[in-house]
Amino acid sequence: MTEPGYVREAREFYDAIAVEYNEMFPSGPEGNPLDRAVLETFAARVRDDGGGPVVEAGSGPGRVCAYFTALGTDITGVDVSPHTVKLARARFPELRFETGTMTALERADGSLAGLLSWYSLIHVPPARHPEVLAEFHRVLRPGGRLLLGFQVGTVPNHHERPFGHDVRLDFHRLSPDRTADLLAAAGFDVEVKLVRAAHGEQEKTPQGFLLARKATP
């Protein structure tokens, strides 16, 4: 199967900026208490369901995986950028990180208790979201948990030549209502839809979170 162009663009972008991107983020959890509460709620629901393997699709520098591991979650990070994965392994040698894509996760059908896409679906053009959500649905077991985090909006944020590197990438802002509808169409029950205001100097838009559960027959 031919690799989508947006996957190649994301790989090239994050391979180029991997060192600088890794240095941008602390090793600890999210700085915003509300964001931490969302992550902890997801972890608690996976645990209350009996636990099991969780994948973070788009794990970046690995700090969110490290946070979930501290919460007792059996999590593996998957990222499209080999350079980013290499740095995450060096930073957190006790954790598991793999190179892979959200469009073709190397997991058996119904094998995951949870799946996290924390600011990674934003790298997929909105027209392709249904196929990515279908892949998330495939790998989750019945009742499995899904958490999405994203910037809210309608206009993409185009990044060009970050840190002086000759790469570019669109960051797609999402509509919480549209994304919730897509989740329902993909076979998920949406349990939490949350939007918070932008916080701090770096955030320019509201932030959205959707917590969903793979519907059971």
Image: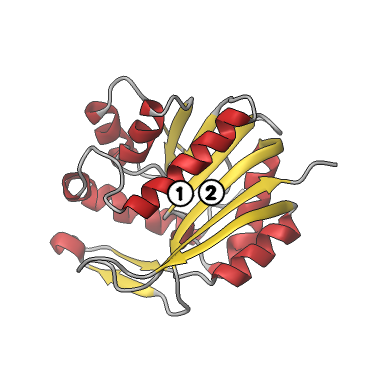
Q: CA distance from mark 1 to mark 2?
A: 9 Å
Residue 215: assigned label: none
Q: Which residue is mark 2?
A: 147
> Image point 26% across, 50% down: which residue?
31
Q: How are the colours assigned in the image?
A: secondary structure
* Depicted 68 relative to depicted 59: above or below: above
Query: Which is nearer the N-term, disc 1 or disc 2?
Result: 1
Q: Quadrant of the C terminus?
A: top right
Instruction: Kindly indicate whether the residue at mark 2 contacts the one at mark 1 (C-beta within 8 angstroms).
Output: yes
Instruction: Using the rendered view, name the quadrant where residue 50 is placed.
Output: top right
Q: Of residues 99 and 90, which is closer to you in this image?
A: 90
Q: Is residue 17 left or right of residue 139?
A: left
Crowding around mark 1 (Cα neighbors within 10 Å: few <14, some 14 to 19, many 20+) is: some
Q: Amino acid at mark 1?
A: Val
Q: Foreground residue, 171 or 188?
A: 188
Q: Which mark is in front, 1 or 2?
A: 1
Q: Looking at the picture, does residue 130 appear above or below residue 36?
A: below
Q: Residue at x 29, y 28 (%)?
A: 89
Name the residue: 28% across, 68% down.
203
For mark 1, give the secondary structure.
Answer: helix
Where in the figure is residue 111, as x and y percent of width and height?
66, 29
Tag 1 residue: 38
x%, y% of residue 156?
A: 41, 75
Residue ID at (23%, 37%):
27
Q: Is residue 11 visible?
A: no
Q: Which residue is farthest bottom?
A: 155
| Residue 17 appears in view | yes
Question: Could you classify mark 2 by the number of other residues whose Cα lies within 10 Å: few (under 14), some (14-19), or many (20 or more)?
Answer: many
Three-letter residue code for mark 2: Leu
- Badge 2 element: strand
